[in-house]
Image (spheres, grey):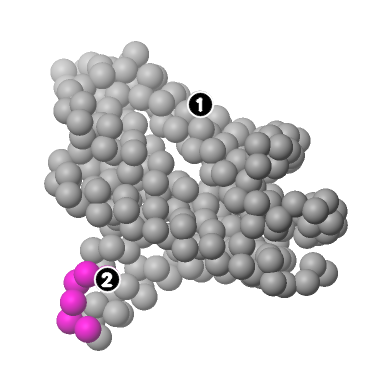
Amino acid sequence: MLNVISSEFYKIFKSKIFYAISIILLAMNCISIFLKKSTLVTSKIKGQTLVTGFSSYRESYNADFVFYIILIFVVCLITAEYANGSIRQMACHGIARWKLVLGQYIAMSSIITIILLSFGILNLLTDTIFFRLGEVPIAAFIRMNIGMICMFWGVSGVGTFLSYFIKSVSVTIIVSMLLVVSCNLITNLLTLLTKNDVFTKYSLTNMRNTLINFNSKPEDVVKCSIIFVLIGIITLLASSLIFSKRDID
């Protein structure tokens, strides 16, 4: 298993999507720094400093672009192996297919977690330098980060499942984007039909908002984290089953 994981890490570091995602997020950090300089001047004139390092860290994940980044990263990596035929070579090495899927999932989820956390930490550091760190209960900050990691790995599982199920990079990306875009519409429709707000409460967007809100109740953060973990486990099992039973084209 360790050989599979290390091999997947090697392939990720050689992939174009790894560098593309890293450059895009780094560019967003740089643009944010320039904007913060103008904000700093304005805040000094008004005598107010509303921005803090912790608030900037939170805002780093306060948009659905996080879902898009994860899905595009995972989809491009897996479907590229179908496109170049390397997936067939992997399956012919005598290694159990479920191990290949698990090793790939662990490597991809680990890398995208490091990339996204680095993005947020860089925003936290720059705003701390330009403004101030701010005050947040350490327990709430830890809960947020654990919840975010659960979310990253859960969404990675969704991307993994869609990639093995569809296999086409363009179609899979389109379906992934539509899934995120239509999520709120579907949950609102289910809430309207069932007269139960549980669907809205546990939509992808609302669960993300719960996780990044330092004032969220601990039990709500735990529930959302568990749901994302379950999403990751279920989609990983489904991906392993599909890859094990389906012939490789």
Given the image, on which type of amino acid does mark 1 rest? Cys
Whether residue 45 is situated above or below residue 143 in the rendered picture: above
Q: Which residue is mark 2?
A: 199
The quarter of the image holding the N terminus is top right
The quarter of the image holding the C terminus is bottom right
Q: Residue at x 28, y 46 (%)?
A: 211
The 10 Å Cα crowd at callout 1, few under 14, some 14 to 19, many 20 or more, is some
Residue 147 image offset from top left, x and y in percent: 33, 43
Label 2: element kind? helix
Q: Are marks 2 and 1 in contact (CB under 8 Å)?
A: no
Q: Residue at x 55, y 30 (%)?
A: 26
Q: Which residue is mark 1?
A: 30
Tell me if 245 is positioned left or right of 200 in this view.
right
Number of the label disc, if any, that sits on residue 189:
none
The residues colored magenta run: 194-199
Tell me if 1 is positioned left or right of 89 in this view.
left
